[in-house]
Amino acid sequence: MSQSDDNQLFSELIKKANERSVRISMRYFDEYSTMIPGSLLEIIGVEESQLNSDGKRILDYLENEPDTPSEEFSFTKFKWKLLAFISLQDIFDGKVLDDYKTDNLFQLKYFYYESKYILQECIIAGLCGLQVSNKQLLRSFIEFNLLQNYYTRLTEVDNSYNSFNQYLKHSNNPNYSKLVNKSFPNDEFCKPIKKRIQVELKNLSERFNHAYGPKESLKQFGVFTPSTSLPSPYFYVHMSCVLDMTLWMYFVNYPMLFLPVDIVRKFGFNAPIGLFNNHSNDAIIRMAISKEDYNAFHEYALNQQVVVDLLNFYNCVEDLNDDAIWKTWDNERDNEDTITTCYVKQIAKIRAISEFLCANYVKMEDVTDEAINYFTSSYLHFSDLKKNYKNLK
């Protein structure tokens, strides 16, 4: 690589770091829609150019070959679960508490959006044959979603952002027992979900996140350098199981997901952020889980006080006619625009703004000369390490 190529490379990387952008892919379903989830890359917002040649071959096979006989482990079912996970962000609200700052309203969603990035990387790794990386990323994905529910619940219980603000300063995670237990309502219904998560974290830790035994080695499939192998076309099966329990986390913490309402008919385009679920996202959830599971979570939701309160509030608001709804639309309209298309545009815009503002608070840290000198004098040479190892932090 020439000097000019080097300069161009770093110029592009610096530009990417400074000019942050968010890519949003929307799937919206109404009563007339054909329920097709779309392509995997469209769902997760990834370009095909981000895959290697093996990854493209695996993806082409998965998208075009008949699904597996078992619906639960089908690639289509996996895509519905991904769509359900991505749609969760629409129900996140921002609470204005006594100690709130504008930052808090967006930063509290940090864990979810970071897990969404990890999910993208995990899928790319799986498609491209990086099976060890794929498995190791699953643990981080689970942890980030636990933290999302943990700090959301803690903020509500304390009626304060103090605990979350302390996390932002020090990044000290609670221990696993506390994290799992405090991420859920304290009731019998949630106990199986907690147990499932504990077992999965233990399994991932023993089999992939620490030194693993020969039974887990990909060399049994003839892989001696990172590349696709016999398990590669089925990388998504384990991910699908992890997505199940991740969705369950949110289902019990956001029970309004199972009581969809006509948001635009009540509030026009001035609806409160979060709180309510629309019928499109409900249709996605119905495709992602079994009918029996949907009914179980729906019944659980009906017994939650927050659902009773929000439905009472919703039912007290009078319906708007179409003219009244359009009066709440502040942007220009295309000739073919309908209330539904404008609502979809609004959802996409809110998703993009939420993720962008959340990411915008993740700052690049300046590397000082002092830090560089400390590193080089303490870590790089054994002769220096012998002198300084007692002072390492």
Image (cartoon, helix red, strand yellow):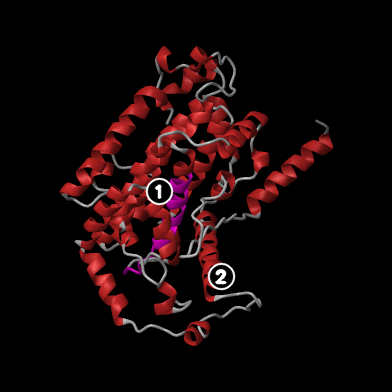
Q: Quadrant of residue 93?
A: bottom left
Q: Nearer the viewer, residue 323 or 330?
A: 323
According to the image, label 1 marks what residue?
Answer: 288
Question: Is 169 one of the magenta-colored residues?
Answer: no
Image label count = 2
Question: Is 94 one of the magenta-colored residues?
Answer: yes
Q: Which residues are magenta?
A: 79-98
Residue 105 visible at all: no
Residue 237 drawn above or below residue 275: above
Residue 383 drawn above or below residue 241: above
Residue 383: x, y in percent? 54, 15
Residue 235 drawn above or below residue 82: above
Mark with earlier residue (2, 1):
1
Mark 2 belongs to which amino acid?
A: Thr
Residue 351: x, y in percent? 51, 61
Q: Nearer the viewer, residue 279 or 41?
A: 279
- Provide the secondary structure element on which disc 1 rests: helix
> Residue at left 52%, top 85%?
327
According to the image, label 2 marks what residue?
Answer: 341
Residue 19 visible at all: yes
Mark 1 belongs to which amino acid?
A: Ala
- Provide the secondary structure element on which disc 2 rests: helix
> Residue at left 36%, top 43%?
244
